[in-house]
Image: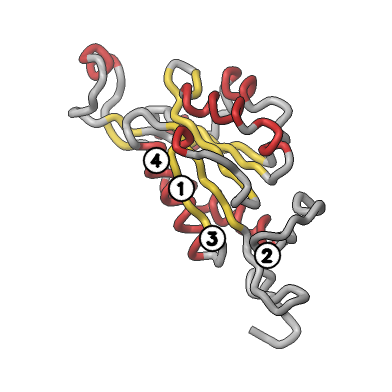
Amino acid sequence: MSPSRVDPRTRPDEMGNTVSARVLVAYATKLGSTGEIAETIAQVLRDSGHRALALPARDVTGLDDWDAVILGSAVYAAYWQRDARRFTERFREELKARPLWLFSGGPLDRRLGKADQPITPHGAEITAELGARAHRTFGGRLARDAAVDPQVLQTHRLGDYRDWQAIVEYAYRIGRELDRMRFPPAGRADPDRRSG
């Protein structure tokens, strides 16, 4: 890297501390597929120099330790999971005060997964007014041994329809946006944390 270009993730703050974003990737999953997407997004962000952790939405007890949030939910019959809805209810004001990105997992169709379907009306309703910067829909996965009603296995396509390249690209896009934001070192408040 040339001396004239400074990587914003490794640029020290005024006290000489390296500042990177602390990113929570919260997810609501039923069969694990959405959790695997969240883990991949968190890993890409870590590889990009940020501090990211994927956690089930139901296990999150607070957002004070996080500069930014990515929230994902599995979608069944066009509905986001209950844990995602409860997460948005519990942390509504805190989510409004942080950069927020969303993703949905679910279509059991490679074509639909690649088409990046808009957020479902239910997902849009529970995330309304949170100021999300973007949303992305990814394909889902249904395995033959999935713990679901046997009729679901007969009426839905089996297979893994997640487009891992699209997932990684979305995570890199978020990482690039985070690179352009200012975040305080841990333990210091900054009223300008949403600016880009």
Residue depth check, mark 1 versus mark 4: number of the one nearer the observer:
1
Please name the residue that numbered disc 3 is placed on: 51
Residue 15: percent from the left, percent from the top? Answer: 74, 77
SS of the residue under disc 4: helix
SS of the residue under disc 1: strand
Q: Tell me which label, 2 or 4, sits earlier in the chain.
A: 4
Report how far apart the C-alphas of labels 1 and 3 lie in the structure: 11 Å
Decide: marks 2, 3 in contact (CB < 8 A)? Answer: no
Q: Which mark is residue 7?
A: none
Residue depth check, mark 3 versus mark 4: number of the one nearer the observer:
3
How packed mark 1 is, by other alpha carbons closer than 10 Å (few <14, some 14-19, many 20 or more), is many
Q: Tell me which label, 1 or 2, sits earlier in the chain.
A: 1
Please name the residue that numbered disc 4 is placed on: 35
Decide: marks 1, 4 in contact (CB < 8 A)? Answer: yes
Which residue type does callout 1 highlight? Ala
Which residue type does callout 2 highlight? Pro
Q: Which mark is residue 54?
A: 1
How packed mark 2 is, by other alpha carbons closer than 10 Å (few <14, some 14-19, many 20 or more), is some
Number of numbered discs on residues: 4
Report how far apart the C-alphas of labels 3 and 4 lie in the structure: 18 Å
Please name the residue that numbered disc 2 is placed on: 185
